[in-house]
Amino acid sequence: MIPLNNAQEHSSYGYGAETDFYIIVTIPLLVNIFSFLGSLYIFYRTFVRWKNDRRNISLSFRFPFYISITDFVYSSCILMEFTYVTFSKSEFVNNKESVTWPYLFCEIIGLGFTFIVLLNILLVGAISIVTWLRVVREHYLDLGRYDYKVWLPILFVSSIIPLSTVYAHGSRGYSCGTKIGYQIVGFIVLAIILVTLTTIIICYASVMRAIRKIKEVNESITNSHNNLIQINSVERKTFKKILTYILVFILQYVPIMIYNVCGFLKVRHVILDALIPAVISLGGIGNIIQFLYNEGLSANKYTSNYKLESNEQSQKSNNTMSEL
């Protein structure tokens, strides 16, 4: 335990020790339980598809699975951390002590949170770039076994940043993460969020323009009624997917940007501290909602994406769009 005079003062920014405790614990726990269960469901669906088909799983299935890995790890850490906090309520309320894990373990957890958040952000950006390459540039990049060419760069960047700022991680009073007053990590995360958001908007806007061009070409070709119907269907589905990708990212990380800006301005409140561990996991909830919308509830019926996937070599453009 860390005495509050060596941590941050809670009473000055909340509603009293006990009320603050319930706010700061309840919101992250509830949201992360849903994110955790959603990630498990995507693991199950991915395993069923791999087991039934015994072939390479398409990008439209692999990418939600990859994102769910980061969501699962993050939610697991949050559940572990706040479960510990829940059992330490009396120490906080009665003794006015911080209730995070012991210092060294808390520092490791803080490093892990920074790593997994950066991994999630960069993975979303990498997915948008790969999609842009396949649809707009028609460049069928060999991603290697287990897509290691996607994973290695983002794993390296996600690792180097927290390891170079070890001193900035530790107890935040209620949780482990970036210590109060250490702004360097906040600046880096803010910059990466802005760059990634700009990247996904530009990439997906280019994807939609490419699909429109294919549609215009088919409209000018006689006897292409069936192709046009298919392209219109792909366009609508792609637009919905792209829109949800962007909206989920905004919902997930714009609050983090606002929180970081408030931190730079030394503005803190218990509601902000409760929402931040929760909004990151909204990405996991958004991922499962989008997955169910695109693939359906049944694990035995492969809808939307896979009905459009066939003969990649002869129909590259259409199949690439179907893998979004």
Image: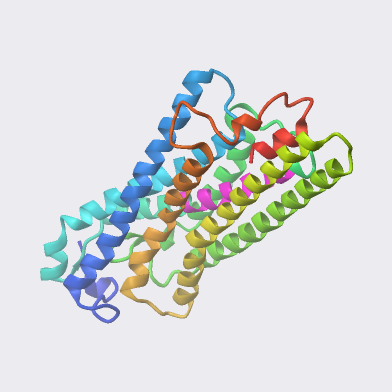
Residue 45 position, x and y percent, is: 44, 31
Residue 116 position, x and y percent, is: 46, 49
Residue 188 in sight: yes
Q: In the figure, is residue 63 to the left or right of 91?
A: right
* Front-lying residue, 280 or 90: 280
52 within the magenta span: no
Q: Residue at x 29, y 50 (%)?
A: 79
Residue 177 position, x and y percent, is: 38, 59
Quarter of the C terminus within the rendering: top right
* Front-lying residue, 200 or 14: 200
- Examine the rendered structure and indicate whether residue 91 appears above or below residue 227: below
Q: Residue at x 48, y 54 (%)?
A: 162
Q: How many marks?
A: 0
132 within the magenta span: yes
Q: Which stretch is magenta?
A: 116-133
Residue 261 position, x and y percent, is: 50, 74
Quarter of the N terminus within the rendering: bottom left
Q: Main secondary structure of the magenta part?
A: helix
The colour scheme is rainbow
- Examine the rendered structure and indicate whether residue 18 appears above or below residue 71: below
* Front-lying residue, 297 or 201: 297
Q: In the figure, is residue 227 to the left or right of 165?
A: right
Residue 178 in sight: no
